[in-house]
Image (cartoon, coloured by chain):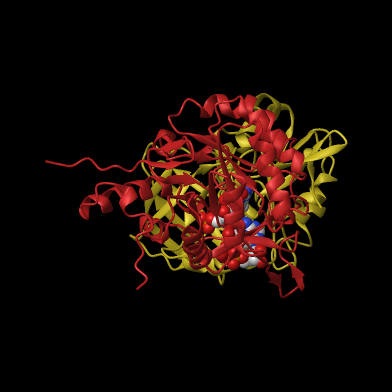
Chain colours: A yellow, B red
């Protein structure tokens, strides 16, 4: 669970986004949608670990794709090749837990990624590709720079950017036409997930992000609202999630 | 030849194999840590605060990081004492570690009811949380109210036969006075400190970052405050003091013991390194061995102030 992995590379892809590869033991297993909780600092600032979805897995290596937004991700971006990275994981459930191969034969699988939500969706897309299961990826971001086509070989894909610098112009969600034959798996900002709630589909599943303290189910900081009859419960994203049936979630 | 080192300490009727306990709210109901280490190694496990009925807790955002610390306003989300006894305790009790339940009530009677329910279980002690900054009722309302505290302790004592610890904070009133008061009322020990009230503001939106506006500060940032509180209280009471606040390693723990704490609790550090408790236990043992101090009790309260 607690791992020390060597940094293989930590490459800058654009102004703010980095691509990091960590060496892990061959026995390390991870499923699409799961994340790792990285200790980015050796001192007390920042204090808490930072969670990142696994972007890619190959025997003996895991990758993450992350955006620098504050002190923690900045410290992570300063890690160099050969540095040892302390991380806990894999944590959380997986898209695979909600996936049925039989169902996928009759339905259309749509993956939707917004911004860095692309990380976990990418891993799932590779998993599907490996199993020769057909899917369509809807991929949206701010602009051309934040769309990583180089990782999308052989994906059937629709792209949208806010400024139209690549693909369609506008929100990616406006290009999804769902029906009762559609199964959606998505990850991205909550505003995107909320929009997807109103798209017609047979089933919808989403991976959520939230502010995390422990990523171990004990601090109860990462909760989201899950319907319970007419009422709701606060449920942990790090333990019961990160992937939920999207119809069960109350997004504020 | 190696001399055996005694790390056993006593809190009320409780004998702990070492002075390291988990702090409430940072260790869940214990079971999430099974995958990291053998829970039998801990001095004691203190559970998340439990009330009579389940509590939903506050709206998110519930935590935010601050320099060398964090603010939390969880709002005491918990499964309720009865669910704890039926769902969690059966698994917890197989470990050779005393279980202490952190108790929270909105009314005086609720504390007493929860304690009475626990009296007939394997739970070996209770820690009364009268100092939570994140709930409107209970929590702080009692922290400065000596009459209420007296009613709670006396009410519990009527039936409850095991160890009673009262958890205090420096948020309201005078923590030494309150500790003395708890001792007089018959508490077996006091634990301090609970989190310190704080807040953080988003300068873009000018809104408080926590939905609850205020939160409780924990982590290394509060260690000096905690240490001073423990030092002051330990000089004034005869019952054991349990030191809490910003302990990240065995050196921090030693500071608390030297200041007068009989035991320590580890909180926020569990989030960063789930093995912290185990490392502190080992660190203390190795320190005693290296310094040829064969009994941990010989270090407690040995601060030199001249
Ligand atoms: C399960 C999970 C998986 C994630 N996967 C990825 C990923 O694959 N790639 C990636 O780039 N990021 C991912 N994130 C988000 C990433 O964890 C945060 O961006 C990071 O923790 C920010 O740390 P920081 O110290 O740089 O920023 P901070 O200084 O902590 O925060 C800067 C700003 O970001 C906000 N923020 C902080 N944490 C989060 C969060 N968890 N979610 C949303 N906003 C936040 C803060 O409120 C603040 O406004 C994931 C988060 C979770 C919970
Ligand atoms: C997320 C979180 C939840 C907490 N919940 C409780 C609680 O339910 N009851 C309680 O008495 N203290 C609670 N505390 C306070 C801790 O037990 C401890 O007193 C405090 O965090 C200071 O110790 P630390 O700096 O080692 O974390 C909580 C603290 C945190 C960070
Ligand atoms: S992050 Fe602590 S419970 Fe989920």
**In the rendered picture of this protein, how many numbered marks are placed on residues?**
0
Asked if residue B152 is positioned above or below residue A203 in the image, the reply reads below
Could you say which is closer to the camera, residue A168 or residue A58?
A58
* Residue drawn where x is 78% and y is 59% of the image: A171
**Residue B85 vs residue B191: left or right?**
right
Quadrant holding the N terminus of chain A: top left
Q: Is residue A224 left or right of residue B297?
A: right
State the image coordinates of residue A123 (x, y, percent, origin top left).
56, 45
Find the residue positioned furthest to the right: A230
Above or below, A94 relative to B221: above
Residue B126 drawn above or below residue B204: above
Q: Does B211 sit left or right of B226 as displayed?
A: right
Q: Quadrant of residue B113?
A: top right
- Residue that extends furthest to the left in the rendered view of this protein: B1
Residue B77 place in picture, x, y as percent: 70, 44
Q: Is residue A213 visible?
A: no
Residue A34, quarter of picture: top right
Image coordinates of residue A147 in percent, x first then y, are: 63, 61
The residue most toward the bottom is: B203
* Residue B269, above or below B95: below
Work out whether residue B92 can be spotted: yes
Between B160 and B100, the one lying in front of the other is B160
In the image, what residue occupies the spot 85% across and 45% down? A198
- The residue sitting at the front extreme is B184
Q: Which residue is found at the position 71% from the left and 71% from the top?
A: B202
Instruction: Depth check: give the residue in front, B252 or A190.
Output: B252
Q: Position of residue B173 (x, y in %)?
A: 66, 64
């Amino acid at each position: 669970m607690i791992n020390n992995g060597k940094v293989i590379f930590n490459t800058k892809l654009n102004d703010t986004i980095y691509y990091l590869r960590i060496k892990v033991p061959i026995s390390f297993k991870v499923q699409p949608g799961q994340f790792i909780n990285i200790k980015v600092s050796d001192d007390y600032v920042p204090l808490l670990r930072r969670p990142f979805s696994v972007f890619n897995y190959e025997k003996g290596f895991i990758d993450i794709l992350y955006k620098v937004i504050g002190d923690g991700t900045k410290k992570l971006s300063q890690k160099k090749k050969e540095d040892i990275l302390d991380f806990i994981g894999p944590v959380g459930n997986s898209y695979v837990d909600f996936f049925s191969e039989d169902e996928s034969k009759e339905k259309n699988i749509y993956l939707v990624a917004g911004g860095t939500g692309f990380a976990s969706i990418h891993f799932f897309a590779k998993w599907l590709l490996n199993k020769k299961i057909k899917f369509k990826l809807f991929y949206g971001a701010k602009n051309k720079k934040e769309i990583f086509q180089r990782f999308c070989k052989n994906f059937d894909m629709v792209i949208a950017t806010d400024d139209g610098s690549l693909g369609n112009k506008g929100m990616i969600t406006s290009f999804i036409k769902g029906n009762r034959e559609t199964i959606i798996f998505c990850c991205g900002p909550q505003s995107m997930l909320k929009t997807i709630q109103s798209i017609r589909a047979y089933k919808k599943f989403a991976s959520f992000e939230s502010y995390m303290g422990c990523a171990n189910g004990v601090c109860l900081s990462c909760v989201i609202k899950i319907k319970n009859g007419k009422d709701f419960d606060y449920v942990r994203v790090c333990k019961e999630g990160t992937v939920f049936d999207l119809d069960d979630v109350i997004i504020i | 030849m190696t001399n055996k080192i005694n790390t056993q300490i006593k809190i009320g009727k409780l004998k702990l194999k070492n002075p390291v306990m988990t702090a409430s709210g940072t260790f869940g109901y214990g079971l999430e840590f099974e995958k990291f280490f053998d829970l039998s190694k801990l001095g004691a496990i203190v559970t998340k605060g439990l009330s009579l009925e389940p509590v939903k807790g506050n709206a998110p955002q519930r935590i935010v990081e601050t320099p060398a610390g964090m603010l939390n306003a969880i709002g005491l989300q918990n499964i309720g004492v009865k669910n704890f006894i039926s769902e969690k305790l059966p698994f917890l009790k197989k470990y050779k570690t005393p279980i202490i339940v952190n108790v929270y009530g909105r009314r005086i009677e609720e504390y007493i009811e929860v304690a009475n329910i626990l009296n007939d279980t394997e739970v070996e002690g209770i820690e009364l949380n009268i100092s939570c900054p994140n709930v409107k009722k209970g929590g702080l309302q009692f922290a400065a109210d000596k009459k209420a505290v007296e009613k709670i302790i006396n009410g519990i004592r009527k039936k409850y036969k095991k160890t009673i610890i009262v958890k205090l904070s420096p948020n309201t009133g005078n923590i030494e006075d309150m500790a003395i008061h708890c001792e007089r009322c018959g508490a077996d020990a006091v634990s301090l400190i609970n989190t310190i009230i704080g807040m953080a503001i988003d300068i873009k939106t000018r809104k408080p970052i926590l939905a609850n506006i205020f939160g409780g500060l924990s982590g290394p940032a509060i260690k000096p405050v905690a240490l001073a509180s423990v030092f002051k209280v330990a000089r004034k009471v005869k019952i054991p003091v349990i030191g809490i606040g910003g302990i990240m390693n065995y050196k921090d723990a030693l500071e608390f013991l030297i200041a007068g704490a009989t035991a320590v609790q580890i909180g926020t550090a569990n989030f960063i390194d789930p093995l912290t408790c185990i490392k502190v236990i080992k660190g203390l043992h190795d320190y005693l061995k290296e310094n040829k101090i064969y009994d941990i009790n010989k270090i407690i309260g040995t601060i030199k102030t001249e």
